[in-house]
Amino acid sequence: MAGGDRVLFLQRRAGRAGAQTCLFRLARAHQADGGRPMVVAAASGWLTEACAATSIPVETLPFPSSRALTGRLWGNRLWARRLVSRLRGDGWAPDIVIGNDHQESLLTRALAGALGVPSGIILRSSGMTARDFTKYECGRHAAIFAIGDNFLGRVRAFPGGEKALPLADGLAEEDFLAAPPLSTTFPDRALVLGTPHPDKGWGDLLQALERLPTDAPARRLRLDFTAVPTDAERAGLGLDRFDLSLCRFLERTDDFAARLAGYDLVINASRRETFGMAALEALAAGRMLISSRTGVIGPIVGDPRLLFAPADVEGLAAALAGLPAVWDALRPEIDASRQRVRETFGISAALSLFRAGIASALGRS
């Protein structure tokens, strides 16, 4: 792919989360490599501000409900025409339009059609089904990327997904900044990754802790969760069945690295991930991570005592129970895991995969 290719990315939500962070890193790496990225979002937020701060052009235009009947009949085309008018007024003509997950697929196709250029899609939602793939017309893009090898295999098994290409999310060099040293003793608190969605395993973690003896050090951990559940989410997870006196639910932060630096222990109890970027960020930050074997985490964490099977409450309980006795002995594993993250999932590797896929879509391979 020629270094100067102009890639327009569509991302509805601009608040900081995994998809937005990974998109920003990819767009910035493409820019540093001589490319010309642009990001279009429905409204301003962390993503548009981060792009503007690094001279990546941004546009904001409220997205229609692309799956609604009105969207399909005329809303998507009207939205695309309005955006094309803006782009032409700015003298900006992309070579390809890329949607950052399947929910953006229909608008991506509408905009690419109005511009007369190819389209692509980055698929990253672990809960996406074959039905979602079909109804969002994901198979009709010139470039179909799937994040993570396991998810790629699933997508290629969908009707029309056979041509899906591999893509990995990547971490930038600043994500590997020197981290505060870990305590030599087992900590009294831990950061719990995820959201209140059942797939993130918060309920599994609380059940695991209840299985520990009352005098077990891990049983007394103070848990700080990285999101605040609504009343409906609390009820759906059954959180009120547990003693939450040692739990805090934290508001989202735009400086996740700073939050990670405040904890020696991070817990990723997720039942399902396509990739697992938050867990990788914890390793890159030099934190001790206990994690389910989801996404790409298993091969990166070298010591099996820090891993358990997804949704395996007993396995998670065993990992937590055994950790205090081996805490100091496991500390060398932190540097080893950190190095594996750098070697395997640096942003340059992600950019190489992306460039290869775009080159194919533009007929340059």
Image: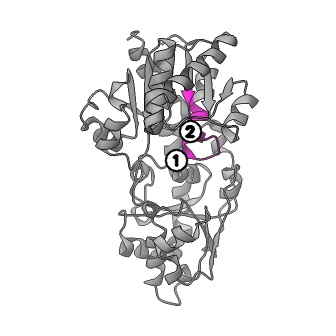
- Was residue 23 drawn as part of the magenta stretch in this picture? yes
From the viewer's perspective, tell me whether residue 245 is left or right of residue 302: right
Of residues 297 and 333, which is closer to you in this image?
A: 297
**Residue type of the residue flagged with mark 1:** Met
**Coordinates of residue 34 in the picture (x, y in percent):** 61, 15
The stretch of residues the image draws in magenta is 9-26
> CA gap, disc 2 to disc 1?
8 Å
Q: Is residue 169 visible?
A: yes
Is disc 1 surrounded by few (<14), some (14 to 19) or many (20+) residues within 10 Å? Answer: many
Residue shown at 42% from the left, 76% from the top: 317
Q: The residue tagged with tag 2: helix, strand or loop?
A: helix
Disc 2 to disc 1: CB gap under 8 Å: yes
The residue labelled by disc 2 is 22
**Residue type of the residue flagged with mark 2:** Cys
Q: Is residue 35 visible?
A: no
From the viewer's perspective, tell me whether residue 293 is left or right of residue 39: left
- Was residue 127 drawn as part of the magenta stretch in this picture? no
**Coordinates of residue 320 in the picture (x, y in percent):** 47, 74
Q: The residue tagged with tag 1: helix, strand or loop?
A: helix
Numbered circles on residues, count: 2
For residue 54, which quarter of the picture?
A: top right
From the viewer's perspective, tell me whether residue 182 is left or right of residue 146: right
Is tag 2's residue or tag 1's residue first in the polypeptide sequence? 2
The residue labelled by disc 1 is 277
